[in-house]
Image (spheres, rainbow, N blue to C red):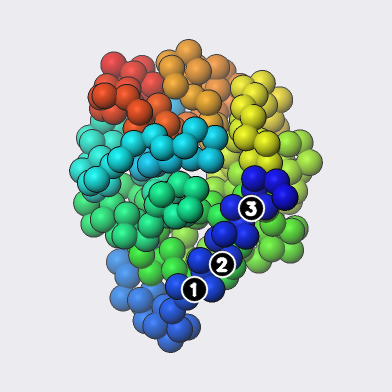
Amino acid sequence: MSVLDEIIAGVREDLDRNRLSLAQIHEMVESASPAKDVINAFNSDGLSIIAEVKRSSPSKGALATIADPAALAKVYESAGASVVSVLTERRRFGGSLDDLDAVRESISIPVLRKDFMVDEYQFYEARAHGADLVLLIVAALSSQQLHDFAALAKELCMQALVEVHTEDEMIRALEISPSIVGVNSRNLKTLEVDPQVFASLLPMIPKNVIAVAESGISTRADALFAQEHGARALLVGEALVRGSDPDLTLRTLLGRG
């Protein structure tokens, strides 16, 4: 199996073990605070950043302890992040829904639940825990799943970040008329990073769609390269959590350091 296949198998196993009843999860959705406006959170006249609470990754292993995800999220918000991304996958990324809860309670900007969404239940779970945005990885989903999951996210008043890595995946993504498309320079099947993916795929995203550059961004030069090819936002995790000053790193990426 590819790395992506292995991760998804683990996600399904954990989901089967920890799933609440439909009645319970629907009750939690009903009592959750209203979803925030994700689209208007992005800067209209410059780069935006989706800043990630990320403890580890399959490619790099342990990145940071992050004993207090809420405190880190507050730093991100203060430094100018537009959205905070919270990894909730446990096995490879060391995340949890507790992290999502803590972050949601601590900041006023939108929150992305960043996980491998492969089951309808996860969308109700995301909204129940306060997510405003969810990730749809085209490589992990059939065309029908992509369509149905995007519709379900919208029904639950959440936005979807539709992630692609190849031209074929981009074509499939655009078929569902997304509002936000992310180009991941990391191949999730091999974990290799190729920044030239930004150059080839970001220009394919229509101007009325928010284009997000993901992975391999650690310097202001990386940010400008992505922006030059059409990115309106950057999703950054490793560079923020591995450095000693996430506030300064984030501001530097935005050109405010």
Q: Amino acid at mark 2?
A: Glu
Disc 2 crowd, CA 10 A, few/some/many (<14, 14-19, 20+)? few
Query: Disc number at residue 17?
Result: 1
Name the disc covering residue 6, or none: 3
Q: Residue at x 56, y 55 (%)?
A: 116
SS assignment at label 2: helix
| Amino acid at circle 3 | Glu
Report crowding for label 3: few under 14, some 14 to 19, many 20 or more residues within 10 A (C-alpha). few
Image x and y of residue 100, in percent:
34, 56
The reply, left or right, for residue 126 in relation to residue 104 is right
Identify which residue is drawn at 23% across, 36% down. Answer: 75
Q: CA distance from mark 1 to mark 3?
A: 17 Å
User: CA gap, disc 2 to disc 3?
Assistant: 11 Å
Residues at marks 2 and 1 touching, judged by CB atoms closer than 8 Å? yes
Going by the numbered disc 1, the residue's amino acid type is Arg
Residue 83 visible to an observer of this rendering: no
Image height of 109 relative to 218, above or below: below
Circle 2 is placed at which residue position? 13
